[in-house]
Amino acid sequence: MDTNIAIDAGKTTLAHATPETAPIVAGRREFFQYRDLLVADATNGLMKAQIMSSDVGLTRPTGWHHHECDAQFVYALKGWVDLEFEDGRKLRLKAGESLLIPGGMKHNETATSQDLEILEVHVPGQMGTIACEKPAHLPD
């Protein structure tokens, strides 16, 4: 991972997203709606920003997984999400709180409120999701 990323102003453009111009796009989970904030195109894929929302809540845990990226930043706008991490931590991220998940860190979303809305930003703009087993050292 390159920790000295410099954004070349000549390769980025201004991006202004509104509820009318930010399109709904396909995403990782069928129970979320994803609104693209136009950042990936404006940064030539250096980063991506989107709003993830749900009006039904999580019906089952997502399953253990990790992301192929340098970092994933989330900020809860509404509602809450329960997460567990490979280091044994369990937390409820609530509206007004943020979380930075390092790329490759195994985690599992176990529950959400019905009115969840999250701003998600990740670097780089392309992010893979890899399913994995629950870490063996964690209790059942």
Image (spheres, rainbow, N blue to C red):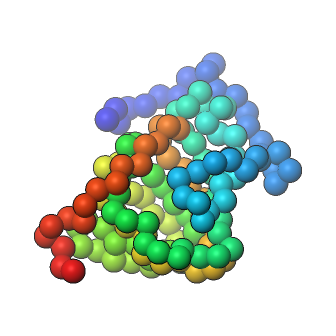
Quick one: which residue is furthest to the left in this view? 137
* Residue 137 drawn above or below residue 114: above
Nearest the viewer among 129 and 81 is: 129
Give the image location of residue 36, x and y in percent: 68, 47
Relative side of 108 to 136, left or right: right
Res 88 quadrant in image:
bottom left
Give the image location of residue 119, x and y in percent: 60, 59
* Residue 5 drawn above or below residue 117: above
Q: Residue at x 69, y 52 (%)?
A: 35
Q: Residue at x 61, y 36 (%)?
A: 40
* Residue 31 drawn above or below residue 78: above
Give the image location of residue 69, x and y in percent: 40, 42
Relative side of 26 to 23, left or right: left
Give the image location of residue 27, x and y in percent: 58, 51
Q: In the rendered view of the protein, which quadrant contains the N terminus?
A: top left
Q: In the rendered view of the protein, which quadrant contains the C terminus?
A: bottom left
Q: Residue at x 45, y 52 (%)?
A: 72
